[in-house]
Image: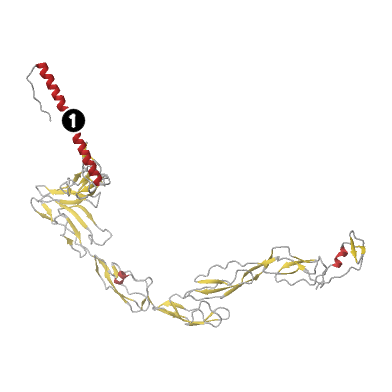
């Protein structure tokens, strides 16, 4: 506690004070003897005196220097001053340091109780299905000249294919325990019961679940597992002894057993699978291949999906009506194996694909008098003329089986089929449509000067206007007829007078 009192020494001072009714002079320093002393400075939680204190009382105006504690940093002048009334005067000059952000916990979360400042604590927990390995909390503490977290982030691993039978918690403390098992098709390696020890470790160590079956479906040549059509789950495991039945792909036939079994060594039994179904190789004598499709990667000369367009030598004709044969999935040719049969004149028309434009069959082929095919006639249809319209795809000519769409100009509509096709006889089928002027319902077509009048919004008003207009036209016509009649009569009278012809009688209505 500070002490207040009277000066014992009196020295000359520049100021004059009245003390008990007398005029006395004092020195500037001795004036403080009339003020209050300060006791020991307060104990601050964030700082301490820079030098050791040997006194218990401090005169007014005394200044003590301080230094910040570990975990704090200086922000203002670190001094305490003894005030005139025996109290120490100071402001907060040290604040807590802050630990770095600990980051995110994979498969878990970090619970921040207050903040990241010195002395604060954070807690860790794992998501459901994951087990916490490490400390459940961490405190911001002094490490050297800085502050750091006492414990690093724990791990929250998941036991692959594992199941928590009992004891699951977001975080664990000393003596907590859990019971672990494995999913079907997996076997537990290690103890199924583990405990949380005092040093934040599990004892015994966390177990693992290892496969106890076959995975990775075997690849069988030319075959597929039937269940694949029902969306098999990813990484599905099959127990030892499981049998899977495969089937051949279209166009293949089996060459071995198509059932595989999961063995004790976790490996599937093997199978040679299926081979491509081959069609017999045709005798190409007298055959001229126009075009063909073949899978040259196959072991077959001709396999399922292959086809041949062919022609025959003079005096022979194709066994297939259109000169095309296709290899089927069952290993047969349809409609027949390519073959040239002897024969006389042959009536018929055939189509072959243009090699430059695969999807369009645009060649018309017939036979001459010797039953020899002629490939010179390409089917072309002329460009149709659409008045008040246009074609969706404009070209000078169109090939057989080519389809085009007719589009009419604004205010016109298609009369007839909008889509037409170039036929093999070089005509358009169906007949080329026309574009007809659209007339709103309730309007009448009135032709004036060769043009169609547009109908106004109100049909009744338009009808009335047209009737009036027709009446005015009729009156105008009658006036013109009257003028013609008068002029004709005048001309006749003039002619009678000049030529002295007999009198004409003219009746004018």
Is 100 left, or right, of 25 in this rendering? left
Q: Position of residue 156 (x, y in %)?
A: 51, 73
> Percent x, y for residue 168?
49, 79
Question: As rendered, which of 149 and 169 lies closer to the eye?
Answer: 169
Image quarter hosting the N terminus: bottom right
| Residue under the image location 75 percent in, 72 percent down | 42
> Is residue 105 in view from this perspective?
yes
- Give the quarter of the figure containing the C terminus: top left
Q: Say which of 18 and 371 sits in front.
A: 18
Depicted 378 relative to depicted 121: above or below: above
Is residue 288 shown above or below 62? Answer: above
Which residue is nearer to you in this view: 272 or 68?
A: 68
Q: Quadrant location of residue 137?
A: bottom right
Residue projecting furthest to the left: 502
**Observer-nearest of 274 and 54:** 54
Report x, y in % for residue 227. Answer: 30, 72
Would you place residue 188 above or below residue 118 in this image? below
Neighbour class for label 1 at 10 Å: few (<14), some, many (≥20)?
Answer: few
Q: Is residue 451 visible?
A: no
Q: Residue at x 77, y 71 (%)?
A: 41
Q: Position of residue 118 (x, y in %)?
A: 64, 70
| Residue for badge 1 | 480
What colour-coding does the image apply? secondary structure
Callout 1 secondary element: helix
Q: Residue at x 21, y 57 (%)?
A: 307
- The residue located at (12%, 53%) in the rendering is 317
């Amino acid at each position: 506690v500070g002490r207040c009192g009277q000066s014992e020494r009196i020295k000359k001072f520049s100021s004059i004070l009245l003390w008990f009714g007398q005029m006395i002079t004092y020195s500037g320093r001795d004036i403080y003897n009339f003020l209050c002393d300060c006791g020991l400075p307060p104990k601050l939680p964030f700082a301490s005196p820079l030098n050791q204190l040997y006194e218990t009382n401090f005169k007014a105006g005394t200044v003590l220097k301080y230094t910040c504690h570990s975990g704090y940093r200086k922000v203002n002048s670190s001094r305490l001053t003894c005030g005139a009334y025996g109290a120490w005067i100071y402001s907060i000059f040290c604040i807590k340091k802050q630990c770095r952000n600990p980051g995110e916990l994979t498969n878990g979360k970090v619970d921040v109780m207050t903040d990241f400042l010195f002395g604060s604590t954070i807690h860790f927990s794992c998501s459901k299905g994951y087990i916490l390995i490490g400390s459940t909390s961490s405190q911001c503490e002094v490490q050297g000249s800085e502050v750091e977290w006492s414990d690093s982030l724990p791990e929250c691993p998941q036991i692959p294919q594992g199941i928590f039978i009992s004891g699951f918690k977001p975080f664990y403390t000393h003596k907590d325990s859990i019971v672990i098992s494995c999913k079907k098709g997996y076997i537990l390696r290690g103890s199924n019961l583990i405990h949380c020890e005092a040093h934040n470790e599990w004892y015994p160590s966390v177990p693992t679940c290892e496969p106890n079956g076959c995975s990775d479906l075997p690849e069988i040549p030319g075959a597929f597992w039937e269940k694949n059509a029902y969306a098999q789950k990813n990484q599905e495991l099959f127990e030892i002894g499981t049998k899977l039945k495969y089937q051949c792909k279209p166009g293949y036939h089996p060459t071995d057993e198509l059932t595989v079994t999961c063995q004790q060594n976790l490996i599937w039994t093997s199978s040679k699978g299926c081979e491509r179904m081959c069609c017999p190789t045709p005798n190409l004598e007298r055959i001229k291949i126009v075009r063909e499709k073949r899978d040259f990667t196959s072991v077959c000369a001709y396999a399922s999906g292959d086809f041949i367009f062919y022609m025959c030598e003079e005096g022979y004709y194709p066994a297939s009506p259109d000169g095309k044969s296709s290899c089927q999935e069952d290993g047969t040719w349809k409609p027949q194996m390519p073959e040239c049969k002897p024969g006389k004149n042959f009536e018929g028309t055939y189509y072959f694909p243009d090699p430059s434009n695969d999807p369009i069959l645009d060649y018309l082929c017939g036979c001459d008098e010797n039953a020899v095919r002629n490939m010179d006639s390409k089917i072309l249809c002329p460009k149709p003329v659409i008045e008040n319209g246009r074609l969706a795809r404009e070209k000078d000519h169109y090939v057989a089986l080519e389809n085009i769409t007719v589009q009419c100009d604004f205010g016109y509509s298609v009369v007839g089929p909008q889509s037409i096709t170039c036929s093999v006889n070089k005509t358009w089928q169906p007949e080329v449509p026309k574009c007809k002027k659209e007339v709103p319902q309730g309007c009448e077509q009135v032709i004036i000067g060769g043009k169609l009048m547009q109908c106004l919004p109100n049909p009744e008003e338009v009808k009335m206007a047209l009737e009036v207009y027709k009446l005015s036209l009729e009156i105008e016509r009658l006036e013109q007829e009257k003028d013609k009649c008068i002029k004709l009569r005048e001309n006749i009278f003039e002619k009678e007078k000049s030529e002295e012809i007999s009198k004409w009688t003219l009746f004018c209505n």
